Image (spheres, rainbow, N blue to C red):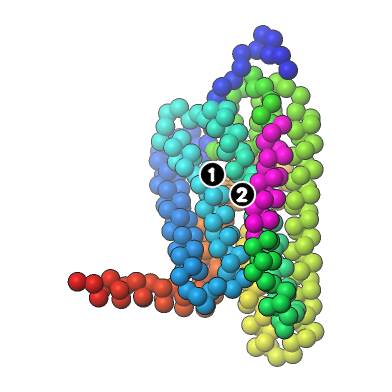
Amino acid sequence: MALGNHSAVTEFILLGLSADPHIQALLFVLFLVIYLQTLLGNLTLLLVIRADSRLHTPMYFFLSHLSSLDLCFSSATVPKLLENLLSQRKTISVQGCLAQVFFVFASGSTEACLLSVMAYDRYVAICHPLFYGQKITNELCNGLAWGSWGLGFLDALINILPAMSLDFCKDQSIPHYSCELPSLFPLSCSDFSTNFTILLCSSLLNGLVTCVLIVFSYTLIVSTILLSISSSSGRSKAFSTCFSHLTAVLMFYGSAFLRYFTPTSGLPLGLVFSVQYSVVTPLVNPLIYSLKNNEVKAAVRRTFGKYLHYSSSCP
């Protein structure tokens, strides 16, 4: 579209979470601590899963992919947020903004796919335990994991390519701490109806399909536990194997729904839900999967006990 008398926008202003310098300083410390803990927690989980052969199972293989994904998800937004909290010019170039949109979209879409894959893994483990090794093979695990990454990045690519043709010539201000595709539409002087339709269809398709798969898997899991396992200890053990994953699913889908599908989307409360969705969830996922998981806790002790023993034995 021709710009006519409009002047093209080359950068956006991210208004962030607060305009108060004192609050910004506190937020910088808070988000720095959160980001460092996110890096430490997910990298530790990756190290432990790789180092301990007892965790070389499909469930922990998928969990290692989830940790890698959480590192990408958090790193797509938090470093720029930290920079802007310290800077007077809270700007981001149009190209940088679109790149951030791409990686946030790809990370979110991939996580939705991966959580549905992990639900299927739990379904086979509980509903068909005798055939688990035959059904969940290494080839299938690799296909499901990398297929989730591929679908997530394809989803992001489908949305970002049309967005690259948009002309921005209106208000430069984005009422957010990061770039999100819906926030860019009101700033465009191009017709974005096609972009909006692609975004809506791809988001509904990805969200609904993965959500239905998760709900269907857990419906079968719950019915199997209640109907096929008579002892209370057996039921408790079966439910405990799903607790961590179900908690992660509820946090991810719950915060995403509150962020994008409620009237708070454009309000300050919407920013809170966005922080939980893209910042807090990557922080707590490794905690969820380790604090309630005796196998992971034992593996952490073995792994770091081995490293401590090795370092103390060195002259």
Residue that lies at the very extreme toward the left in this rendered image: 315
Please report the bounds of the magenta region as a residue range: 145-162
The answer to whether mark 1 and mark 2 are in CB contact below 8 A is yes
Query: Quadrant of the rendered structure where residue 148 is?
Result: bottom right
Classified by dominant secondary structure, the portion drawn in magenta counts as: helix
Which residue does the image show at 72% across and 31% down from the upper left? 162
> Residue 107's mark?
2
In the rendered image of this protein, does residue 11 appear above or below residue 243?
A: above
For the N terminus, the quadrant is top right
Q: Secondary structure at mark 2?
A: helix
Which residue does the image show at 62% across and 22% down from the upper left? 171
Query: Quadrant of the rendered structure where residue 144 is?
Result: bottom right
Q: Report whether residue 293 is seen.
A: yes
Badge 1 is on which residue?
A: 76
Which residue does the image show at 65% across and 60% down from the upper left? 145
Q: Report whether residue 297 is seen.
A: no
Q: Earlier in the sequence, mark 1 or mark 2?
A: 1
Badge 1 amino acid: Ala
In the rendered image of this protein, does residue 182 appear above or below residue 281?
A: above
